[in-house]
Structures are given as C-alpha cells and as structure tokens.
Amino acid sequence: MCDRSLLFELLLELEEAIRRIERRFTRIQKADDFIADDDGLDRLDDISMMLIAISENIRRLDRLMAESLANRYPEIPWSEIKGIRNILAHDYFDIDPEEIYRICREDLAILKRVLGKIRHDLL
C-alpha cells in the first residue's frame, strides 16, 4: 500500500495548479490572445509552467497508486498529460497557443473532475 498522505498532498497540488491556470485563463477568449501582447505572453508562460507541474505530479501520482491511473480512470489520456512536460520544457519556443488554449478550454475541467474522483476513492 502507498502513503495516502503523500497521495493527498499530490492531489492538492494538482488541484491548486488547475485553479491557478483557471485564474490566469479568465482573460483569454481565443488562442491568439496568448500572443497578442505581453500580458498574453505572460499568461501563456504561467499556464505552461503549471502544465509542467501538473505533468510531473501526475507522473508521481501514477507511480504511487496501487493500480495505474490508466487502468482505473481510463477517461483521461494520462500518457499525453505526462508527455506534455517534455514538449513544454524542451520545445519551449515552439509552444502552440492553440493547443494550450484547447487544453485550458476543454481538458482541465475533465481532469479536475477525475482528480476529485481519485481523492474520493482514496477516502
């Protein structure tokens, strides 16, 4: 069995990272807003950093869980979440604002819901 307190800590960090992204994304109405001015670029940078943190914590969470995330919660593309860290960290100057926009607009709400489900299942 794994250390439940560490699992809960990772989940809290993931939920906080999502909240930060949601807060920074509020003024973004379309992908081009990320590159329209310095404020948009700052938001793109900040959100990308939080996506890296999410990716790293998902990787840690998956290692600590008794059953793999992909097996237990197949509605999330876990390998893609884990892989985005490498794209953002190593291809930083080629970040696609459209993809970041899509992640923020579509994927984060699903991830947030599943993280809540994971936390509930650990209780």
Image: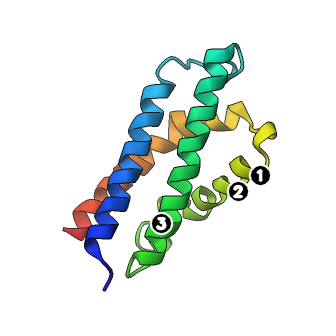
Which image quadrant for residue 18? top left
The residue lying furthest to the bottom in this view is 1
> Residue 5: in sight, yes or no?
yes
Tag shown at residue 86:
2
Residue 86 placement, left or right of 13: right
**Residue at 63% of width from left, 20% of height from top?**
40
> Residue 101: in sight, yes or no?
no
CB contact under 8 Å: marks 1 and 2:
yes
Which image quadrant for residue 29? top right
Residue type, numbered disc 2: Asn
Q: Where residue 8 appears, x then y in whole percent?
A: 29, 63
Residue type, numbered disc 3: Pro
**Residue at 58% of width from left, 56% of height from top?**
81
The residue lying furthest to the left in this view is 123
Q: CA distance from mark 2 to mark 3?
A: 22 Å
Q: Where residue 54 appears, x then y in whole percent?
A: 50, 52
The way the protein has been coloured in the rendering is rainbow
Q: Where residue 22 appears, x then y in whole percent?
A: 44, 32
Q: Nearer the viewer, residue 44 or 28?
A: 44
Task: Give the residue pinned by disc 3.
Answer: 74
Look at the numbered disc 2 and give the secondary structure of its residue: helix
Look at the numbered disc 3 and give the secondary structure of its residue: loop
- Number of marks in the image? 3
**Residue at 69% of width from left, 32% of height from top?**
98
Instruction: Examine the rendered structure and indicate whether residue 43 appears above or below residue 115.
Output: above
Q: CA distance from mark 1 to mark 2?
A: 6 Å
Foreground mark, 1 or 3, reads: 1
Task: Give the residue pinned by disc 1.
Answer: 90
Disc 3 crowd rating (10 Å Cα; few below 14, some 14-19, many 20+) is: few
Tag shown at residue 57:
none
Disc 1 crowd rating (10 Å Cα; few below 14, some 14-19, many 20+) is: few
**Residue at 77% of width from left, 52% of height from top?**
90
